[in-house]
Image (spheres, rainbow, N blue to C red):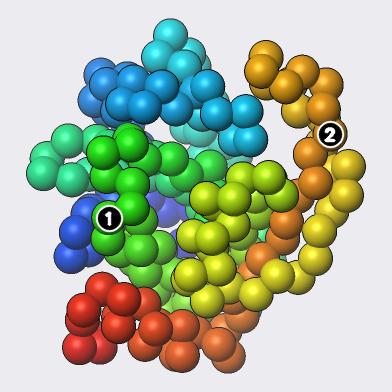
Amino acid sequence: MQRFRTPVTLIGGHANLVPLETVHHDDLVQAVKDGALWERWVTAIPAPENMAGEIARRLDLQELGTMLPFAIIVAGRAVGMTTFMNIDAANRRVEIGSTWLRQSVQRTPVNTDCKRSLLTYAFETLDCIAVEFRTHRFNHQSVRAIERLGARLDGVLRSHQINLHPLAPQTLRDTCVYSIIAGEWPTVKAHLDHQLGRRGG
């Protein structure tokens, strides 16, 4: 379905999500340097010199119809990236992933606000049956963030991927798979609104 592939801007209370473009490159290079995020072995975050290639990769997947990438904008600057990925339009399913934020905006309302915007669009515009989240079993910060959203653990894919990060070469990744299904969305939405201090909407 074409609407799964159409770039869109999502306006939130703490951050806006805009279609990723090459113009975001310089902001994203500065963002990833905040905390040297590419050194975290439990996730795949591009190093500054690889940012152009990562933007190109995401835009290529957008052309293929399997990803809808966003730049996360706070106070007019890109502070990270997120996506709808592994898009399965026929079964009305998406995964929210490949997300990272500069360290200075982590543990602020920005991530929750972005997830609320993405989930609202997924369930209320794309009419998704389910939205999935995946993370490394040892990425404890990501696990906690996903569980705070109200997503439920579907299971763990053991030895799911080979980790090629130079700080942990050739180790095996156990992938935790979480989801929120359509019937849960009203309750999850109320939960997120409470976290964000909103009165519904």
The amino acid pointed to by label 1 is: Thr
- As helix, strand or loop, the secondary structure at mark 1 comes to loop
Q: Nearer the viewer, residue 78 or 9?
A: 78
Residue 189 x, y percent position in the rendering: 40, 82
Q: Residues within 10 Å of mark 2 (few under 14, many from 20)?
A: some
The amino acid pointed to by label 2 is: Leu
Dots 2, 1 in contact, CB < 8 A: no
- Classify residue 146 as left or right of residue 55: right
Q: CA distance from mark 2 to mark 1?
A: 31 Å
129 vs 156: above or below: below
The residue at which mark 1 appears reads as 108
Total numbered circles: 2
Quadrant position of the N terminus in the picture? bottom right
Q: Residues within 10 Å of mark 1 (few under 14, many from 20)?
A: few
The residue at which mark 2 appears reads as 172
Labels 2 and 1: the sequence-earlier one: 1
Quadrant position of the C terminus in the picture? bottom left
Residue 124 x, y percent position in the rendering: 42, 79
Question: Residue 128, located in which quarter of the rendered image?
Answer: bottom right
Q: Which mark is residue 166?
A: none
